[in-house]
Image (spheres, helix red, strand yellow):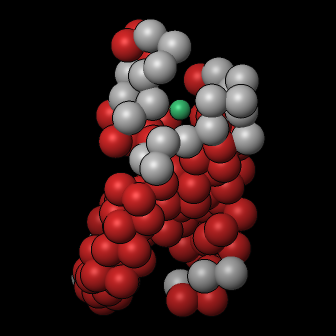
């Protein structure tokens, strides 16, 4: 059974890897910051189901936060509405920061963009790891 360290590691890798195909949306000078953000977002997403359903709740702690149906709805909403809106906002802020020559804002919004891109992959990695255990995931 995957523990917190495994979920964080796999989530971070999933977040960073899922972002590689999206890097052409930003300039090369933002890639490092975006990958940092996507790794952090992946770690967060990789912990999210256990944040919602804390393991301290006992061996049968998996509930709505681990539910296949709730996560499917949540991720569908994220990929169709929330994610694209956040992505567009971050891209606009990066463009504005470059026009105003603000490295601080460019870095902050590049990291934020990475978090937006990486966190759902981390969440999916958590569900995949937990789904491969004998307890599986609740419907
Ligand atoms: Zn879990």
Which picture quadrant has residue 137?
A: top right
Q: In this view, does 109 lie above or below 58?
A: below
- Foreground of the two, 6 or 138: 138
Q: Is residue 127 above or below residue 59?
A: below
The residue at the point 68 percent across, 81 percent down is: 21
Relative to residue 80, is residue 124 drawn left or right?
A: right
The residue at the point 39 percent across, 74 percent down is: 76
In x, y percent, where is residue 86? 29, 75
In x, y percent, where is residue 54? 39, 22
Q: Can residue 77 be seen in this view?
A: yes
Relative to residue 122, is residue 112 drawn left or right?
A: left
Q: How many marks?
A: 0
Which picture quadrant has residue 9?
A: top right
In x, y percent, where is residue 73? 35, 67
In x, y percent, where is residue 14? 67, 55
Q: In this view, does 24 lie above or below 54?
A: below
The residue at the point 62 percent across, 89 percent down is: 24
**Which quadrant is the N terminus positioned in?**
top right
- Foreground of the two, 112 or 67: 67
Relative to residue 85, is residue 120 drawn left or right?
A: right
Q: In this view, does 90 lie above or below 53?
A: below
- Foreground of the two, 104 or 12: 12
Residue sticking out furthest to the front: 139
Q: Is residue 44 visible?
A: no
């Amino acid at each position: 059974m995957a523990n917190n360290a495994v979920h964080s590691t796999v989530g971070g890798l999933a977040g960073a890897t899922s972002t590689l195909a999206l890097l052409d949306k930003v300039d090369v000078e933002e890639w490092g910051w975006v990958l940092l953000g996507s790794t952090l977002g992946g770690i967060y997403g990789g912990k999210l189901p256990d944040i919602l359903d804390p393991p301290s709740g006992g061996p049968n702690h998996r509930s709505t936060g681990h539910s296949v149906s709730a996560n499917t709805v949540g991720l569908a909403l994220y990929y169709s509405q929330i994610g694209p809106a956040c992505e567009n906002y971050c891209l606009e802020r990066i463009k504005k920061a470059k026009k105003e020559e603000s490295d601080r804002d460019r870095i902050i919004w590049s990291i934020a963009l990475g978090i937006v891109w990486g966190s759902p992959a981390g969440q999916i990695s958590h569900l995949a790891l937990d789904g491969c255990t004998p307890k599986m995931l609740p419907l």
